[in-house]
């Protein structure tokens, strides 16, 4: 049996601490003795997945700083890219049934906790797995060299811009594209940040960022109950940002931003290619065919994308800011990577997760994010208006036919919160009440439609709930104050409450109408794993949109040129360029008259 040092967190600030912790854990004599009891092959390699301790019911401010380790065995073939280890120790198909706890101050293992491996019939019981609890586990690989058969009929898809991109980058971080202009920022905690967003020189947003995310797990068996990651506050999106590669993470004509972080000694460390910038076709932009003449006017949508990908232990997250020709801004979040797993006895199932591979239980959990929006719609002072669409009661005076409905507007007067209501078609508009649209006479603004996602499920008063109260509501409105940047508070590692986060900011009960304010949007998903999520999870995509609402006096993409074959150079199936025999039809233009 071998113990191999691999760490699950690769960011700069914690990598030294985690590597040292893994060394201590894997060389602890009691840990070695527990591994021997499992009857693994002599050449089995054991690796350590280091988790923040989180918090427990009996945690106090005096609880020592600790790391909870989950241990895994590598597959018998010991390939270095096995699903049992990939650079950062992803040993998720052979989980071990015990967990060491490391006191970081004492620098020693202070507790070894058995992990429950039973199913529905066992309740919270432990030691149900027998003398060789891993014998029923099986290899389940995702790395291409270890997959026996891969598809051979997928032809190359290339994104070519022969005249180069339509964007410019000046002064290192100032991006101009079409009528958009903004600056790209980066820091260790949030990673990608967008500053000073303007469209056609008109100010829109002072700052856009993902403020926090929490991943609470739903397995009540100790110590799984402590599994609650704060991937920004604990680890740092900037500190875990990937170095992106041409032809892999982004396609087309790419511009990369490289940034600076620091190591454990405070020395500057270059973070290469952590943000990619490129254009992407967005499908149909707008179209209308005149039914009288058969003439079609059609444009292609196009987006400018800024993407950052982070790896935090087992998961990857891609955060993509999309700027569109029609004035929309979208934040797209893609969750992928490998499920954090636990051992389960053969033939059993569990209420707390799904069996995704022999002997492997993937626990239920949530991914809850906070999108921080600091607006400046035509100026620093703005107002948030909640708009619902409601049916008008039938009456002879106002609605004799029963078909009427109206918009009900409710401005936020004081800081506070609200929730999504899709059945009311609820939207939240950021408006400048002093600036009116000449056509509609409404205040100019942008609207956000909150995602009606399930909010945090941990019970009120529970440790997991108290640490992430920002996830109790979809929308928060606060008055701007320097330093109010983190939805879950500044200090999340082993926190007991989300001190000085958005909940405390909203509780100040400040006047927010026509003020310098901040809008916070909670979004995410409850992830009840599928077998299809293993051995690696297909991207789960969530999109939050900011859309102009009476900000312009007509469709801002009306001046996008007509889509033309001369420019797009699409290729007919069956032509020499495709190398196929099938013929799809006759080639024509986008505006060919109907016969």
Image: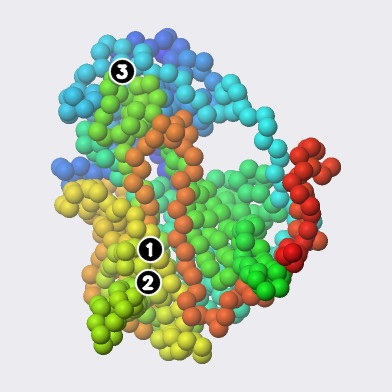
Q: CA distance from mark 3 to mark 1?
A: 42 Å
Kind of element beneath mark 2:
strand
Give the percent coordinates (x, y) of residue 420. Answer: 32, 63
Q: Is residue 434 left or right of residue 69?
A: right
Q: Residues within 10 Å of mark 1 (few under 14, many from 20)?
A: many
Q: In the figure, is residue 61 to the left or right of 423?
A: left
Mark 2 and mark 1 residues within 8 Å of each other at the beta carbon: yes
User: Where residue 72 sits in the image (x, y, percent)?
Assistant: 39, 24
Give the quadrant of the C terminus: bottom right
| Element under disc 1 | loop
The residue at 54%/20% (across/down) is: 79
Q: Where does the image place residue 160, in percent across and percent down from the top left?
A: 74, 52
Would you identify the image quadrant in which residue 350 lies? top left
Q: Residue at x 25, y 13 (%)?
A: 130
Going from the N terminus, do you reach mark 3 or mark 1 first? Answer: 3
Q: Which mark is residue 450?
A: 1
Q: Give me the disc on residue 346.
A: 3
In the depicted structure, whether residue 435 falls above or below residue 242 = below
What is the quadrant of residue 100 in the picture? top left
Choose between 495 and 351: the one closer to the eye. Answer: 351
Mark 2 or mark 1: name the one nearer the start of the chain: 2
Asked if residue 72 can be seen in this view, the reply is no
* Nearer to me, 240 or 323: 323
| Residue bearing mark 2 | 428
Q: In which image quadrant can residue 380 be found?
A: bottom left
Task: Give the answer, above or below, for where 466 lies relative to 504.
Answer: above
Residue at horizontal 37%, vertical 56%?
523
Image position of 294 (left or right of 421)? right
**Of the residues under marks 2 and 3, which one precedes in the sequence?**
3
Q: Callout 2: 10 Å neighbours few (<14), some, many (20+)?
A: many
């Amino acid at each position: 049996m071998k113990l191999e040092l691999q760490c699950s967190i690769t960011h700069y600030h914690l990598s030294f601490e985690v590597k040292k912790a893994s060394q201590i854990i894997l060389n602890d004599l009691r840990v070695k003795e527990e591994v021997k009891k499992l009857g693994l092959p002599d050449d089995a390699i054991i690796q350590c997945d280091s988790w923040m301790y989180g918090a427990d019911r009996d945690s106090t401010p005096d609880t020592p700083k600790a790391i909870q380790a989950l241990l895994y065995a590598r597959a018998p073939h010991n390939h270095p890219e096995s699903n049992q280890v990939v650079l950062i120790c992803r040993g998720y198909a052979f989980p071990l049934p015990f967990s060491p706890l490391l006191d970081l101050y004492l620098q020693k293992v202070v507790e070894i906790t058995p992990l429950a491996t039973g199913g529905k019939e066992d309740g919270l019981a432990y030691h149900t797995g027998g003398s060789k609890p891993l014998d029923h586990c099986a290899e389940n690989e995702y790395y291409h060299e270890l997959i026996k058969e891969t598809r051979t009929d997928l032809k190359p898809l290339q994104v070519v811009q022969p005249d180069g991109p339509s964007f410019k980058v000046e002064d290192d971080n100032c991006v101009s594209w079409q009528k958009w202009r903004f600056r790209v920022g980066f820091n260790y905690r949030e990673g990608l940040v967008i500053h000073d967003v303007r469209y056609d020189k008109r100010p829109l947003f002072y700052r856009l960022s993902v403020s926090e995310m929490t991943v609470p797990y739903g397995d009540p068996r100790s110590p799984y109950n402590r599994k609650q990651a704060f991937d920004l506050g604990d680890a740092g999106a900037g500190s875990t940002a990937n170095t992106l590669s041409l032809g892999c993470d982004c396609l087309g004509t790419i511009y990369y931003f490289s940034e600076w972080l620091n190591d454990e000694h405070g020395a500057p460390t270059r973070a290469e290619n952590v943000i990619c910038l490129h254009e992407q076709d967005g499908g149909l932009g707008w179209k209308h065919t005149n039914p009288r003449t058969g003439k079609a006017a059609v444009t292609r949508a196009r987006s400018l994308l800024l993407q950052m990908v982070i790896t935090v232990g087992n998961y990857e997250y891609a955060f993509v800011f999309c700027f569109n020709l029609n004035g929309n801004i979208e934040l797209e979040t893609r969750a992928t990577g490998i499920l954090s797993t636990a051992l389960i006895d053969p033939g059993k199932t569990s209420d707390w997760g799904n069996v995704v591979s022999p002997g492997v239980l993937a626990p239920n959990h949530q991914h809850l994010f906070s999108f921080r929006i600091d607006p400046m719609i035509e100026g620093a002072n703005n107002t948030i208006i909640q708009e619902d669409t409601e049916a008008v009661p039938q009456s002879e005076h106002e609605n004799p036919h029963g078909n009427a409905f109206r918009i009900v507007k409710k401005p936020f007067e004081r800081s506070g919160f609200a929730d999504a209501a899709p059945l009311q078609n609820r939207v939240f508009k950021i408006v400048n009440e002093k600036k009116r649209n000449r056509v509609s006479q409404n205040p100019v603004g942008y609207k956000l439609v909150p995602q009606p996602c399930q909010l945090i499920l941990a019970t009120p008063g529970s440790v997991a709930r108290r640490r992430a109260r920002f996830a109790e509501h979809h929308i928060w409105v606060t008055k701007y104050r320097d330093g109010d940047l983190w939805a879950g508070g500044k200090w999340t590692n082993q926190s007991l409450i989300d001190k000085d986060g958005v909940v405390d900011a909203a509780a100040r009960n400040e006047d927010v109408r026509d003020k310098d304010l901040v809008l916070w949007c909670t979004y995410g998903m409850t992830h009840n794993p599928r077998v299809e999520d293993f051995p690696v999870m297909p991207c789960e995509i969530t999109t939050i949109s900011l859309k102009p609402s009476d900000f312009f006096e007509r469709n801002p993409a009306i001046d996008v040129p007509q889509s033309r074959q001369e420019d797009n150079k699409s290729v007919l199936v069956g032509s020499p360029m495709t190398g196929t025999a099938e013929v799809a039809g006759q080639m024509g233009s986008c505006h060919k008259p109907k016969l």
